[in-house]
Amino acid sequence: MDSSPSVVVLLVDDDEDTLAMYALGLSALGFQPVTATAVGDAFECACTRRPRVIVADLGLAVRSGFELIYRLREDIRTQDIPIIALTGLTLASVRQTAREAGCHRFLLKPCLPAALAGEIRDVLLTGEETRFAV
């Protein structure tokens, strides 16, 4: 997998500081991050920018990150884009719902940008459907 700037990664989080930290970190690691803070904007960005991977928080304030995942999976333009859940929600039921919704990875915050980049590279290299970190 090439992590050149051509690898667009959509980051979705309603906390702008968190979003900026991951965007800066992934950019420094050779990715081209694009960001969204809300479900509607994230869906529109996914349709227009066609990111190679989407990293989404599940605990968004206004509309759930799960709503975004369901919309992405239902739309032919976005249904094949790998999704990594990056969340502070630790319940086993959240992990299971993320798996069933179609997430390829489940990572807990805090997660270092380098670890996130490793998961992005891995999902792009292997195409592995699901592997959830503990």
Image (cartoon, rainbow, N blue to C red):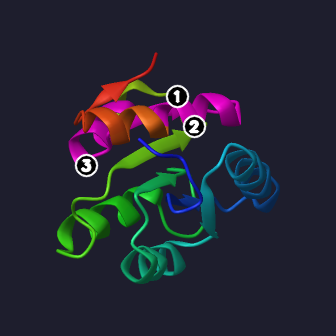
Disc 1 residue type (three-letter): Thr
Disc 3 residue type (three-letter): Ala
- Which element type, helix, strand or loop, lies under badge 1? loop
Which residue is label 3 attached to? 101
Seen from the viewer's position, the closer of residues 56 and 129 is 129
Give the residue displayed 46% in from the left and 37% down from the top.
121
Q: Is residue 118 above or below residue 54?
A: above
Which residue is label 2 attached to? 117
**What segment is highlighted magenta in the picture?**
95-119
Which residue is label 1 attached to? 90
Q: Is residue 18 above or below residue 114?
A: below
- Dividing the image into 4 quarters, which one contains the N terminus? top left
- Is residue 94 in view? no
Image quarter of residue 53: bottom left
Q: Nearer the viewer, mark 1 or mark 3?
A: 3
Disc 2 residue type (three-letter): Ala
Is 125 on the left or on the right of 110, as rendered? Answer: left
Q: Is residue 46 above or below residue 85?
A: below
Percent of width and height locating residue 122? 40, 31
Mark 3 and mark 2 lie on one chain; the one further toward the N terminus is 3
Q: Is residue 112 magenta?
A: yes
- Which element type, helix, strand or loop, lies under badge 2? helix
**Residue lying farthest to the right in this orientation:** 17
- Measure the alpha-carbon separation of dots 3 and 2: 22 Å
Image quarter of residue 116: top right
Give the residue displayed 72% in from the left and 56% down from the top.
19
